[in-house]
Each structure stands twice: as C-alpha cells, then as structure tokens.
C-alpha cells in the first residue's frame, strides 16, 4: 500500500514511537489489514464453534434459562463469546482467584467502590489497592482450579471488573441448575483451542506484549493496575474478537439511533491534560480546537461535518443511559483492545447500543508510559462504524 505524504509524516513519527504492547499497524501506515484479518477470523471462529455439539447444547440451555427468567434473549454469537470469555478468564486467572483470601477480596471490593464514591481520594485509594493486591498475590505459576467460578467472580469484583462478573454470574447460575460436568470441559476446550488459533492469526499484532510482560510489568507489582498491565496475549486476542462480535450483535440497534456519540480516551490528546483546552460537559470533556494536529480535534471536526458528537470519555459511562432508555442514543467507544469489548457489555447493561473501535496502539501515561504517547485509531474504520454519510 502506498502512503500519502501526511501518512508518511505520521509513519515517521510512529517509527520513533515505542510500541508498548500491541500494534494494529505492523509495518503499514494504517490498520486496514488488521480489520480485514479480524473480520475473517471472527467468521471462521464462529462457524467452527457453532458446529460444536457441546457448545450448542450449552448455549441453547442458557438461552432457555434466561427466557424462563423473563430476561432479554441473546444471539448464539453473543453467548459463544461469553462462554469463551469465561473459559479464558478461568484459564488465565482461575488459580490466582482461588488463592485470593476472602477478607482481602472484600477489602478490595470496598476500595473499588470507595474510589467511585470519593473521587478526591482517588490517588490514595489506588495506592491502597496496589498494596492490598500485592499482599494478596502468591508466588508460583498460574493454575486453574476447575469450575471455581465463584472464586473468579470475587476476583473480578476485587479488581473493579464488575461488568464481566455480572455476565459470568448468569452462566454460573445456569450451570448450577443444569448440573452438567461437561460444561466445564467445554469452557476449558474453548479457551485452549482459541489460544492456539488466535496466536496463529492475531499473534502478529501482539508480539510486544511478551516484551512488556518480561521487562516492564514486574515494576508494577505494588500498583493498583498491576493486574491490568499484566494481561496476556490471549486476553488481547479475546478483546479483539470480542469487539468484532459485539459490533455485529449491536449493529442494527446502533444504526437505528437518532443521536450518535463518539467517546475517545484522553490519551488521544496532543496536549497534556494541564494544557488541553477541552471543557467539561455532562457527557465528558469537549474539544475546543486548541491544537490542529490533535486527533481529538480532527475527529471532532469530522463529527461536525458528518453529524456525530465527540467527547473525551467521562468518569462514568452511565451518563449516556440517563433519560435515554428509549434507545435514541448510540455510542461508539474508542479504546484499547483490553477494555473495548467489555465496554460494549457495560453500555448494553444501561440500554445504550454501542459500537467499538480499537486504538491502533496504547500509550496513556496512566498505565503504559510515564510521559504518555498520543494514541490513534483508524479514522476510516471509525467513519464506517459510526455510519456517517457525506
């Protein structure tokens, strides 16, 4: 692919930019190839999984279970993703969750809630979370305690991952009623097969994760985000597939909304926080066009032409659900591969149809780089996802 002059300039900048974990661009100027790759991979994965008799049996039973409780139905593809995600979480964190003492799990959950309740004390509470988590961890390799979903749920909540815990709790409830041992064998098989398949196809985008885990993650041991930055390539691949599948699942409802909002992370700003002129609004900070080269500025200007609004992500996603339960607002979230897909679940929980676009690479100073590297999404993909027209 031939690059324009502006793309070459951005590529030269990217050449000196440290790729911290993943990169969707590889050696190209843009991530177009990635989006073709993940679409093909999702097609193949879904076709294979939904031919598996054990998976289909679990999904059919789960959908019947939800309908019997008066809950909204979900597609086979959504259920397959949830099964995979649960299997991957047990595979990656089952042993760690089993070793987390209940009293410390309860303390960590309290600290997570306190952080939301008292934002002025956020820094001190994050420090406390880091030390408590460090005290709770045990040496040794990760192991899986088969079927310990309750332990995993407590561990997720202790790390502030309540949306994932809520989804997986529904499967725990279903498994308890079905009492079928093969359910846990199905979870393990899904995770193991996906680990091999995704590494072969998506591993080219996540090679940097291994270097980060070896060289940088050990320095985070006493930080509140130690678990977040230590996530494996497998979890990155799960996030990539998750965004693709959820975009398809929520697509029609999103396109039917009258008001489209794009929320972008603060790491996309060209200026540091103290110099950025964005003004606060109930939906998050709004760009005031102080820096023409800033990606947030450019996306905001694009939105003015194409009929969508742009905000820097608010502290609480629920602001988009306030008074909009009629489905009139659709949200496109731009974030990293580790967080984007579960953001789709969070939006769904408040009745807001969402779509996701991945950052091409990470760089925020809160987690990945002490100075911060301005991040960037694929603008062509963003326009396609928003569904904007000339």
Image (cartoon, rainbow, N blue to C red):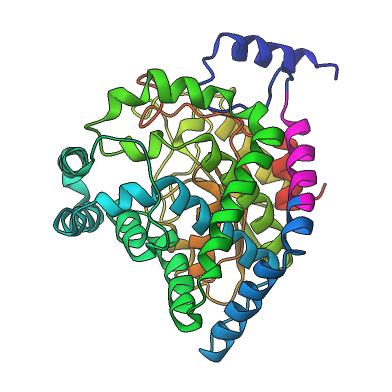
Q: Which residue is found at the position 30% from the left and 60% from the top? A: 154
Q: Which residue is found at the position 16% from the left and 45% from the top? A: 121
Q: Which residue is found at the position 44% from the left and 53% from the top? A: 90
Q: Is residue 289 above or below residue 319?
A: above
Q: What type of secondary structure mainly makes up the magenta span?
A: helix
Q: Which residue is found at the position 54% from the left and 22% from the top? A: 208
Q: Is residue 16 above or below residue 312?
A: above
Q: Quadrant of the N terminus?
A: top right
Asked if residue 86 can be seen in this view, the reply is yes
> Residue 183, image x and y in percent?
54, 69
> Residue 223, image x and y in percent?
25, 33
262 part of magenta stretch = no
Looking at this view, name the residue that lies furthest to the right.
1
> Residue 184, image x and y in percent?
51, 64
> Residue 244, image x and y in percent?
68, 50
Query: Quadrant of the rendered structure where residue 34 is?
Result: top right
In this picture, residue 145 sits left or right of residue 34? left
Asked if residue 337 can be seen in this view, the reply is no
Query: Quadrant of the rendered structure where residue 295 is?
Result: top right
The residue nearer to you, when weighing 13 against 281, is 13
The residue nearer to you, when weighing 318 against 99, is 99
41 part of magenta stretch = yes
The residue nearer to you, when weighing 309 against 238, is 238
Bounds of the magenta span? 30-44
């Amino acid at each position: 692919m031939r690059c324009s002059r502006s793309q070459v300039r951005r590529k030269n900048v990217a050449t000196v930019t440290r790729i911290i974990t993943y990169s969707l661009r590889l050696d190209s100027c843009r991530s177009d190839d990635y989006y073709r790759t993940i679409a093909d991979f999702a097609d193949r994965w879904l076709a294979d999984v939904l031919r598996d008799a054990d998976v289909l049996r679990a999904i059919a039973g789960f959908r019947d279970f939800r309908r019997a409780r008066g809950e909204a139905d979900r597609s086979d593809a959504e259920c397959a993703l949830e099964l995979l995600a649960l299997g991957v979480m047990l595979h990656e964190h089952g042993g760690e969750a089993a070793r987390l003492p209940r009293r410390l799990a309860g303390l960590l959950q309290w600290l997570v809630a306190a952080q939301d309740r008292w934002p002025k004390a956020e820094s001190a509470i994050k420090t406390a979370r880091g030390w408590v988590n460090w005290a709770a961890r045990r040496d040794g390799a990760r192991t899986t305690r088969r079927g310990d979903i309750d332990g995993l749920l407590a561990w997720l909540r202790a790390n502030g991952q309540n949306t994932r815990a809520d989804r997986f709790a529904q499967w725990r409830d279903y498994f308890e009623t079905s009492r079928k041992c093969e359910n846990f064998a199905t979870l393990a098989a899904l995770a193991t097969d996906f680990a091999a398949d995704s590494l072969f196809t998506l591993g080219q985008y996540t090679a940097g994760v291994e270097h980060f885990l070896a060289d940088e993650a050990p320095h985070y041991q006493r930080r509140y985000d130690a678990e977040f930055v230590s996530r494996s390539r497998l979890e990155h691949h799960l996030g990539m597939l998750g965004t693709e599948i959820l975009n398809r699942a929520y697509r029609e409802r999103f396109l039917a909304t009258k008001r489209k909002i794009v929320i972008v992370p603060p790491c996309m700003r060209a200026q540091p926080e103290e110099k950025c002129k964005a003004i606060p609004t109930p939906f998050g900070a709004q760009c005031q066009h102080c820096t023409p080269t800033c990606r947030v500025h450019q996306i905001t200007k694009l939105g003015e032409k194409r009929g969508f609004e742009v905000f820097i992500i608010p502290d609480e996603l629920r602001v988009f659900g306030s008074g909009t339960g009629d489905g009139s607002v659709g949200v496109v979230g731009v974030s990293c591969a580790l967080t984007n897909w579960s953001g789709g679940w969070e939006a769904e929980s408040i009745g807001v149809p969402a779509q996701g676009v991945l950052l091409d690479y990470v760089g925020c100073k809160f987690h990945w780089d002490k100075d911060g590297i301005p991040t960037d999404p694929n603008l062509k993909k963003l326009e396609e996802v928003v569904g904007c027209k000339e």
